[in-house]
Image (spheres, rainbow, N blue to C red):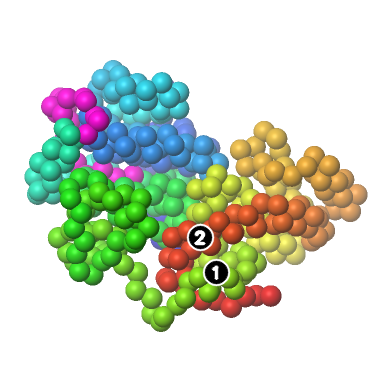
Amino acid sequence: MREPIPLKKGFLDSIRTNKGVTIGDINKSHKVLILFLRQSQCCFCREAIRAISINYMTLLQFNTIPVLVHMETPPVFAEALKEIAEGDAVTENLITAYDDENVISNEFSIQRSLGDFLKHFFPTLKAYLNSEETASVVPRENVDLFRVPSFFIIDNDAIVNEFRNVHMGSRPDYIRVLVDPDYEGEMEVVPIMPEKVCEGVYCPLELKNKKPNLVDIIKNEEKVKNTFSCVPKIEPSVDVDVSQVAEELDMTTVLSNHKYIKYFNVHCAKEHASENVSFWKDVHYNFKKEQNEDKRGKISEKIFDTYLNPASLLEINVTDKLKKSTRKELEECGPKLELFDSLVRDIENQLLCNLFMRFKETPLFTEMILKVGVIKNTN
């Protein structure tokens, strides 16, 4: 896991948002996802804003507030955001911050890339003009077109994870970067030019079937040494029959392995069901492993507040009867190790099993097996 990078003391408190509070104020109670944008007219920036809106509730489940950092004057950007929203209340009400004179981007060491910009501007412009986007592509005042988009996860005044775009069309996986601190990010396919798959990479048949008009993508220099690339090929160290592994691998093994569970956690987050695996982890990794009864009692109260409180964004879907019986058991018998066992069984049988079956059919599961390897069942 990467070490957090502390920000300059008081810096976040100096960044005032369109809601009147500073990013520092927000960071006192929440993680913050800071997304740097070039200009609202850029089709890639518009797509990034829409992606944030789509993932907004999942971000909230992880106690994370997104903040869009822009270079256009607040009235201009607010009008653009309203246009992008097309009536969507979440998009219209996103928190924004004005990066006057690049003060914020300089603190985060946001890079400028003239060469990359010139190399890909014209095909991007051509695709943009041919797309459904109708806004003018004339750059507005005070906008640095050469600034490379990036986003950062901030917690306790420090950068805990980040994604720096390799080029203008990079499509980061916001949820995965948030959920998995070790994830460095990989390129996704961006439709700009006619498809061209180069040596050293491959384009999965499933992906081709879904998007037959895939385009050349700019290289990810960290992953592939080609001018253009599609999906970086994952080379397993040994021959692995993923379908056979999927049949044999059980859920307990995945939940009990710290490498496997990171992938499953990402899957649950994307299924808008992260509370289930989070509850399981808190019970097994925190509550059951604590030997001190007083400390275990405090952990149990936190679990009740986080997962059994109707007002919580992470409330798990179990019956009121089961909640009440668990609370009664805590009051009468104290925080015994088996306190949450009934709830765990219910979550495993009703929810996690279904999530796990769908997980086995995803590219994320294949990536997990090829990268981590095959681990024998714990049972």
Which quadrant is home to the N terminus?
Answer: bottom left
Closer to the chain start, of discs 2 and 1, is 1
Q: Main secondary structure of the magenta part?
A: loop
Whether 342 is drawn above or below 38: the answer is: below
Residue 246 is labelled as 1
Q: Residue furthest right?
A: 332
Residue 70 is labelled as none
Q: Amino acid at mark 1?
A: Ala
Residue span colored magenta: 131-151
Q: Quadrant of residue 184?
A: bottom left
Along the viewing direction, whichever of 375 and 365 lies nearer the viewer: 365
State the image coordinates of residue 274 (x, y, percent, origin top left). Answer: 57, 49
Q: Is residue 376 magenta?
A: no
Q: Amino acid at mark 2?
A: Glu
Q: Quadrant of residue 47?
A: top left
Q: Secondary structure at mark 1?
A: helix
Horizontal side of residue 198 vs 86, given as left or right = left
Residue found at x 35% / y 50%: 210
Whether 375 is drawn above or below 16: the answer is: below
Q: CA distance from mark 2 to mark 1?
A: 8 Å
State the image coordinates of residue 222 (x, y, percent, origin top left). Answer: 25, 63
Residue found at x 28% / y 31%: 70
Say few, some or many: other residues with alpha carbon within 10 Å of mark 2 (under 14 / 14 to 19 / 20 or more). Answer: few
Horizontal side of residue 289 vs 105, given as left or right = right
Q: Report which residue position mark 2 lands on.
A: 361
Q: Secondary structure at mark 2?
A: loop
Check if mark 2's residue and mark 1's residue have beta carbons within 8 Å: yes
State the image coordinates of residue 321 (x, y, percent, origin top left). Answer: 83, 42
